[in-house]
Amino acid sequence: MSLGTKVRQYREAKNWSQDDLALRLDVTQSTISNIESDKSIPNSLLLNRIAKELDVDINDLFNDSSNNIMSNNEFSDHAVAAVNQYNPVFNMHSPEIIESILKNQEQISKLIESQNKLIENLLKK
């Protein structure tokens, strides 16, 4: 049984609509709909809040009780792999990202310099 199916079952067991759960979690109804239809997977913070609102152990939201996603406050390897399939991994050492960061820093430096000149001119007046 999928995560979304389990969320729906626990929600319906409480006789809550998707809107009810969304309101309790401060998310949109479409977020709940996407989770329940397995179009998206919630991040770890939202997943934890869902479990708390539904009064279930976070592990109960996953297929097998033997495949616990968390133990000793650490996410299991299969839980990390499940989330990573929805989140691309970025190589923070790629030349494109480094170049972009450097360009942004250069622009920020120019803006600060420009602001300092404006402040100097205002103080002279």
Image (cartoon, rainbow, N blue to C red):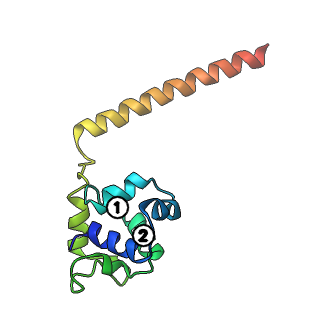
Looking at the rendered structure, the secondary structure element under dot 2 is helix
- Which amino acid type is marked by label 2? Ile
Image quarter of residue 70: bottom left
Q: As drawn, is 25 to the left or to the right of 125? A: left
Picture residue at 77% right of the left edge, 15% below the top:
124
Report the quarter where the C terminus lies.
Answer: top right
Whichever of callouts 2 and 1 sits on the residue coming sooner in the sequence is: 1
Helix or strand or loop: what does disc 1 sit on? loop
Nearest to the observer: residue 52 or residue 124: 52
Neighbour class for label 2 at 10 Å: few (<14), some, many (≥20)? many
Q: Amino acid at mark 1?
A: Pro
Q: Is the residue under label 1 in contact with that under label 2 (CB below 8 Å)?
A: yes
- Which residue is the site of mark 2? 50
Which residue is label 1 attached to? 42
Tell me the residue at 25%/36% (across/down): 96
Identified at 63% across, 24% down, the residue is 116
Q: Could you say which quadrant of the image residue 119 lies in?
A: top right
Foreground: 46 or 30? 30
Residue 73: give x, y in percent of width and height. Answer: 38, 80
